[in-house]
Amino acid sequence: MTEERQEKLTAYRQGAQQLVAMVAGVPQDAWSFKPSQQDWSIAEIIVHLTDLEANHYVRFRTVTVRPGALIQGVDADEWANALQYSVQDAAMHLQLFTLLRQANYDLLRRLPDSVWEHPLEHSERGHITLEQLFNGQERHIAAHMEQIEKTLDAWRQARS
Ligand code: NI
């Protein structure tokens, strides 16, 4: 295992803890607040993160077992609307996210180097490796944690 990959795996695992810590500070009233009609609420962001983690639960396993597998991308807004993120139980999803990420981390940290090079065919990103797929998912949470901060700021301003 390269040092760089080890660091990314650690960051990936810590991402769940950071999200849980951040959300613990969000008042219950703020969870469903939408800064605008188009923006997601914090609850919807949590469901989105969980759906992507669940997708990657399957993707990481599929590509480990079957190199060259076809992986279907997710249109985030399409999923949010069709799956009614706004009425989903976000607190339950946060628990699910934490478990899925823990299970993914436990799988990934044991994979031999050769498996990290397994190719896959992503419907939007094209021909990539398992390592590139993981790197994308590791980075995904940061932008949404920033989005949660901004949404919370907007909620505070709307109340004052
Ligand atoms: Ni996203």
Image (spheres, rainbow, N blue to C red):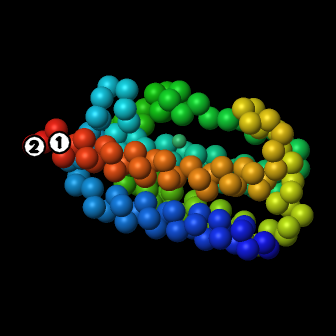
Residue at 89% x, 64% y is 114
Residue 66 at x, y = what percent?
A: 87, 50
**Is residue 25 placed above or below 74 in the rendered structure?**
below
Question: Is the residue under label 1 in contact with that under label 2 (CB below 8 Å)?
Answer: yes
Task: Give the residue number, with chain letter if any, for mark 2.
Answer: 160
Q: Quadrant of residue 117?
A: bottom right
Q: What kind of element bears circle 2?
A: loop
Residue at 34% x, 58% y is 23
Q: Is residue 116 visible?
A: yes
Q: Is residue 103 visible?
A: no
Q: Mark 1: which amino acid?
A: Gln
Q: Mark 2: which amino acid?
A: Ser
Q: Quadrant of residue 120?
A: top right
Residue 64 at x, y = what percent?
A: 82, 57
The local crowd at label 2, few if under 14, some if 14 to 19, many if 20 or more residues have their Cα within 10 Å, is few
Task: Give the residue number, with chain letter if any, for mark 1.
Answer: 157
The local crowd at label 1, few if under 14, some if 14 to 19, many if 20 or more residues have their Cα within 10 Å, is few
Residue 134 at x, y = what percent?
A: 70, 55
